[in-house]
Amino acid sequence: MTIARRRFLTASALLAAGAGLARTAQAKVQPVKLEDRKFEPLKLPRPISLAALTVLDVSPANQVLCAAKAGYSHVGIRLVPATPTETQWDMIGDTPMIREVEANLRATGVKVLDIEILRVKPDTRAINWKPFFETGARLGASQVLVAGNDPDYNRFCDNFAELCEIAHPYGLTLNVEPMPWCDIATVKAAGDAMKRVNRPNAGVLVDPIHFFRADNRYEDIDALPPGSLHYCQMCDITAERPKDMDGILYQARNFRLSPGTGAADLKTLLKHLPGLPISIEACNAELALTLSPLDRARMYLEDMVAVLNAAGEH
């Protein structure tokens, strides 16, 4: 079954990379009850979190339950949608969904690693994000996922610095995730911004699919200012590179592979990200048609632990 599922993942991702066309998957998976699944305990070599994008087909409250049942130590909570097409949950302030998330966190013992997504855009006003930070602190998060979506580099750095100052009293670190289609597209560009901003709670978030699809080198990670790395994301990728940026974007949002099942040299990458908590962001639209969110989450976790073990981490 393991070989079959991996062949399926690889074939579907290759198809997506070649086409580069957005398609909406309509999941027809039978619902899974938590009590119907029994998993053996897994020893996690590092803290491992279930990213929201990995199981975006269930509510944030159920993502917490999914993470707990699958064996994760942490979970990521998406307070602000990344795209207008995804389900919109009322997640800022004292809302019913936030209270349900809190209840499930208390009941399971799972911790929140990060909140997302803060897009720094030309019209960003830092003070407007204070309720976002307050909600993240309420949930116990320590990290914030940030995207640099402002072509004016000076304005981006000014806004990012102010956001860091506002977030600091809440115990939150703001991590810029370099993405090929964003204005902060590479690890080097993010590192340059860290040097300019020079805030103690500013960081860089490395994601394999973005790292290997853009103009990045391992040396760029090593050259980051000390203290820039607070956690990392993990997934795997196809050997074939998408033909254009639309294909790269589509694959990043819909056709990631499970860690250790693709072409990315994750073992080497992990050596440059030593000891960091890991957020598994491995969304796959085709796989969502055949496996429940819980079963996908468990599969990704097992594969990630296997990669870590192969890298000498136990």
Image (tube, grey):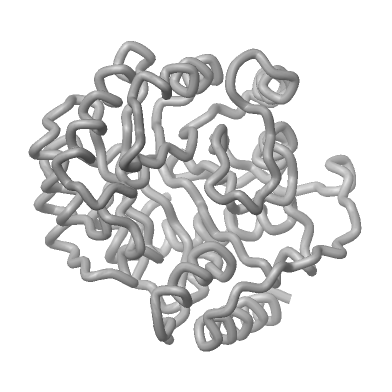
Query: Where residue 90 appears, x then y in whole percent?
Result: 67, 28
Q: Is residue 73 visible?
A: no
In the foreground, 149 or 136: 149
Identified at 88% across, 41% down, the residue is 35
Task: Indicate left or right for 190 with 242 as reference.
Answer: left
Would you place residue 4 above or below residue 88 in this image? below
Identified at 55% across, 66% down, the residue is 258
Query: Where residue 201 appears, x then y in whole percent?
Result: 25, 26
Q: Is residue 225 visible?
A: yes
Task: Indicate left or right for 307 with 229 as reference.
Answer: right
Identified at 9% across, 39% down, the residue is 195
Which residue lies most toward the front here?
123
In the picture, which quadrant includes the N terminus? bottom right
Write down the quadrant of residue 6 in the picture: bottom right
In the foreground, 210 or 221: 210
Task: Indicate left or right for 55 with 26 as reference.
Answer: left
In the foreground, 216 or 73: 216
Say how many tags the image has. 0
Query: Where residue 15 appears, x then y in whole percent?
Result: 59, 86
Query: Where residue 286 appears, x then y in whole percent?
Result: 70, 72
Task: Indicate left or right for 144 with 73 as reference.
Answer: left
Identified at 66% across, 50% down, the residue is 86
Would you place residue 77 above or below residue 190 in this image? above
